[in-house]
Image (tube, rainbow, N blue to C red):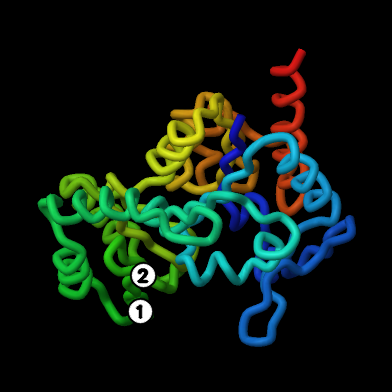
Amino acid sequence: MIFASDLDRTLIYSSKFLEGAEPDRPIRNVEIYQGKEISFMTEKAIRLLKELSQQMMFVPVTTRTVEQYRRVSLFQTEICPKYAITCNGGVILENGQIDRHWQEYVQTKINQSKTSLEEVKTRVIETADAVWLESIRTVDPFFIYLIIKPELAPAEVLNEYARWAAGQGWEFSHQGRKVYFIPSFINKWDAVQYIAEKEGKKPVLTAGDSYLDVCLIEKSGCGLIPRHGEAAADYGHLGLTETSGIAAAEEIVEAALLKKLEAAL
């Protein structure tokens, strides 16, 4: 059995997410960047995840780059998954090393794509306004994302981006200050399925908070969306936590452990 879960706002929570709301349970820092503690988990969630990783295969699945994923110290020292999926499915790490077979598969898809990353970037440059667009960042060669001022970004512009992206075979996702443009063939579920087939492990239990995680929840048929997640409003019927915020991580891991127990009975 595999438990494949998104990280940010699903299992781990940034200091910005926690601002103004003191957690009612012990928490621990799991990521330091430029000398600052920036991500946290509850002590209970860490304990549960350790227990889970001993009973089944835990696969972190994130839109973070490889470098950003490796900043999460918990997964480098205490819980060391055999596999990790980064770049939204663009890169699979096996025992810390890039899976070259998967990399070749993704690169072939990129080469065959009718719309290039540069074309998407050009479209944004030609239509965006510096009033609300702070920067365009490239996760080469996989996707681009924008850093925006959401309160100033016109809804009609973002909606038009979503329609245009869909017409190009790209996924569009607006997550707070970040707006993602990602080719549909670079997605979290396909990477999870590749690992499942490689390891001969099924079923797959999943969790994730954003629209980029919906494919995980839908296609696994057994997943949870944190109640605070952006995907909760439209896809909550697929599986929704009772709790919100950092406590949702505990509920998610407990649910996965329960599924493991039920499968053993």
- Write the residue at 89% across / 56% down: 25
Which amino acid type corresponds to the residue marked 1 in the rendered image?
Ser
The alpha-carbon separation of the residues under discs 1 and 2 comes to: 6 Å
Q: Residue 30 occupies which quadrant of the picture? A: bottom right
The percent coordinates of residue 4 (x first, y second) are 57, 41
Q: Residue 37's mark? A: none
Q: Nearer the viewer, residue 10 or 237?
A: 10
The percent coordinates of residue 139 (x first, y second) are 35, 68
User: In the rendered structure, are the residues bearing label 1 and label 2 in contact, judged by CB atoms less than 8 Å apart?
Assistant: yes
Number of numbered discs present?
2
Q: Earlier in the sequence, mark 1 or mark 2?
A: 1
The residue wearing badge 2 is 146
Vertical order, 203 against 189 (above or below): above
The percent coordinates of residue 110 (x first, y second) are 20, 55
The residue wearing badge 1 is 135
Q: Residues within 10 Å of mark 1 (few under 14, many from 20)?
A: few
Q: Is residue 233 visible?
A: yes
- Write the residue at 17% across / 46% down: 167
Q: Nearer the viewer, residue 7 or 120?
A: 7
Q: Nearer the viewer, residue 207 or 97?
A: 97
Q: Residue 88 occupies which quadrant of the picture? A: bottom left
- Write the residue at 20% across / 49% down: 109
Q: Nearer the viewer, residue 86 or 102?
A: 102
Q: Residue 128 occupies which quadrant of the picture? A: bottom left
- Write the residue at 32% across / 75% down: 136
Give the quadrant of the C terminus: top right
Which amino acid type corresponds to the residue marked 2 in the rendered image?
Leu
Give the quadrant of the N terminus: top right
Q: Is residue 13 left or right of residue 110?
A: right
Q: Residue furthest bottom?
A: 35
Give the SS element for disc 2. strand
The percent coordinates of residue 220 (x first, y second) are 50, 28
